[in-house]
Image: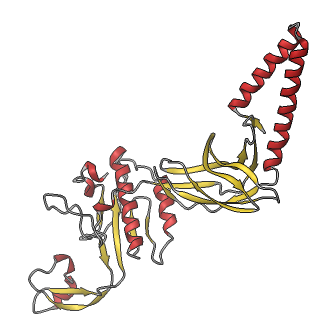
Amino acid sequence: MSPTSFGAKTVAFYAVVLGAYFASPYTNLFFLLVSFLTVVLLLNFGWTWKNVRRLSGTIHELPPVAANSLTECEVQLANGPHPSVNVEVDLVLGRKRHVIGRAAIVGADETIRCRLPRLGRGIHEITAARASSSYPLGVIRASRRLEVPRKLVVYPEPLAEDIVDPTGSLRRDDSGVDLAAQGSGRTETAGLRAYREGDSIRDVHWRASARSPDGLVIREFEPHADHAIDVVFDARCEGEQFELSLRAIARLALTAQDLDQPIYVRSQEIDEAFGAGRLPLPDLWKWLAIAAPCAPDTPPPQVAVGSDAIRLPAALDRFGEESR
């Protein structure tokens, strides 16, 4: 148990009254006042302790959350036969205490919807979680520890949803210039055919074209084959460019999740596919949370010539402030 700010003022007032009792000739009056305050404080200590002594609980697994977002979580509380009153759920991150939820009455088995604080990108250490109450007078606060995961992964705040169209491409700007290539990789060839006017040069099968007497040969793809959003991120950038690139990857990852497609992320430190049967998406969130810029002399990420991947940070050059 620890005193509240009101409790500290109460103790100071009690000390003044006690000093007046010994210094004043009106001892009977101050004796009654000191006696009354002593009884009230002792009863308050006992009542506050009894209010939370049977409380226990668990904060369910905390999934990765976006930076600067208000994300809800569930806290399961168990109690004895007597309900607890005015209970607060506290989360201690580092040395800072955050009140994430409140309940007027907690019965034998309660689930409380709590809201996590806004946090910056990174992996935050959870020092402790407590269910506490200062009922009835607010003089002292008694608390019980809750079971909680030790870390909270906070990935970058995704860029505005309107920068990505339903196919997983970055939208064009007002001038009509592509911010990036399509980026939704078509990885399974259904067959070959002759070149027709309007076909993309990226779809040319060069080896088959070299053997064909009829000129260029085009690859045809399964319309619903293993599509993927392909991202190449050159981490040799700093400051706003670096953070915006991470935010763009976060948005593209959410789009891939909505489309039930994998997202391929290639950078100096990573070359993996996430989601849709590949590595779990939380692994990507963890990497985005701890990613740091590379030194200027670091080689660029390896990518095939002619790749239609979304290239970051180059694709960010035309973004307007309204999309950030």
In this view, the residue farthest toward the front is 29
Pick the residue in front: 145 or 287: 145
Residue 197, x across and y down, in percent: 8, 83
Pick the residue in front: 261 or 27: 27
> Residue at the location (14% across, 62% down)?
176
Q: Is residue 9 above or below residue 113?
A: above
Residue 316, x across and y down, in percent: 27, 55
Total marks placed: 0
Q: Is residue 309 visible?
A: yes
Quarter of the view holding residue 209: bottom left
> Residue at the location (10% across, 86% down)?
196
Give the left or right position of residue 13, taking residue 99 as reference. Answer: right
Pick the residue in front: 226 or 9: 9
Quarter of the view holding residue 266: bottom left
Q: Is residue 302 above or below residue 215?
A: above
Q: Is residue 169 above or below residue 154?
A: below
Give the left or right position of residue 166, taking residue 87 as reference. Answer: left
Residue 136, x across and y down, in percent: 75, 41
Residue 86, x across and y down, in percent: 69, 48
Pick the residue in front: 84 or 285: 84
Give the left or right position of residue 14, taking residue 171 as reference. Answer: right
> Residue at the location (86% across, 8% down)?
23
Quarter of the view holding residue 307: bottom left
The N terminus: image quadrant: top right
> Residue at the location (30% across, 71% down)?
166
